[in-house]
Image (spheres, rainbow, N blue to C red):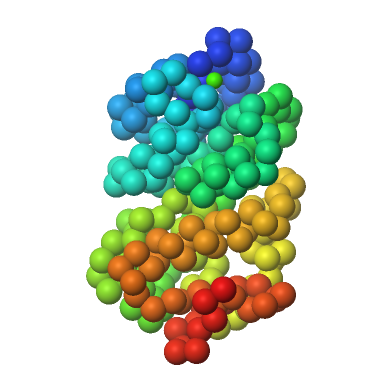
Amino acid sequence: MTKIMIVEDEVGLVTLLKYNLEKQGYDTCVAMDGKDVLAMAATENPDLILLDWMLPNVSGIDLCREIRRSYELRNIPIIMLTARGDEADKIKGLSYGADDYMTKPYSIPELMARIVALLRRVVPVQKTESLTFADMTMDFAKRRVTRSNKPIHLGPTEFRLLQILMQKPGQVFSREQLLKEVWGDSIHVELRTVDVHIRRLRRALNEYNDPELIRTVRSAGYALDSSENNDHE
Ligand code: CA
């Protein structure tokens, strides 16, 4: 059974989310205080986390960062739920490790659609056990990426993005194509979101100052490319 962890300090919202998720057949667990989240996630092992930004003790944005840094928790997809609606906050949420972002008051049917889309996105559709490109290896069984044998820490959306790029090295993917491949058709996501996740992916891949592997093709999109004259955005 798919388990969704609800992290929210407003009782009314917790009740509403729990009711609707359970009606859809999901199992749920609830944390109402920021300081309980990491321990609960480690014990409950949820398939997805709905994370409120404004929480007592530890903020959602800090939790997001902690989850992405944790070896055990980093693959759990996160949807950030927040009253903070401006574009800068959204970009901040995504760049700290959220996979999706919804502004309160959100529509329950839209949230349910985004949960389905995100869960579908993180299940690897892959027949081979691993892919390699240059000094990089992607291991599907372990859901692990290494570069020069050093572990690269990726969230589920970056993992999926990299998987798409690694399946066809050298091919230029437009942002529209990446959106369709990674997020699916069912939900509306802005093109800029792709750039935010590509930036996060690049930062993770270049953690040890390795050469750039993702080429930006102006007004066209992105491609994997290990050649010397790589365009650094
Ligand atoms: Ca709150």
**Residue toward you, 198 or 167:** 198
Q: Position of residue 38 (x, y in %)?
A: 34, 30
Which residue of the protein is positioned furthest toward the top in this rendering?
11
> In the rendered view, does 4 fall on the left or right side of 143?
right
Q: Position of residue 26 (x, y in %)?
A: 54, 27
Residue 13: image quadrant is top right
Q: Is residue 179 above or below residue 78?
A: below
At horizontal 71% and vertical 24% (from top left) the residue drawn is 105
Q: Is residue 204 above or below residue 114?
A: below
Which residue of the protein is positioned furthest toward the bottom in this rendering?
228
Tell me if residue 49 can be seen: yes
Q: Is residue 41 above or below residue 86?
A: above
Residue 59: image quadrant is top left
**Residue toward you, 108 or 94:** 94
At horizontal 30% and vertical 68% (from top left) the residue drawn is 208
**Residue toward you, 26 or 100:** 100
Which residue of the protein is positioned furthest toward the left in this rendering?
149
Q: Write down which quadrant ligand 1 falls in.
A: top right
> In the rendered view, does 135 fall on the left or right side of 233?
left
At horizontal 34% and vertical 72% (from top left) the residue drawn is 209
**Residue toward you, 190 or 86:** 86
At horizontal 68% and vertical 65% (from top left) the residue drawn is 175
Q: Position of residue 127 (x, y in %)?
A: 46, 66
In this rendering, the count of numbered labels is 0
Q: Position of residue 143 (x, y in %)?
A: 37, 56
Tell me if residue 99 can be seen: no
The C terminus appears in which quarter of the rendering?
bottom right
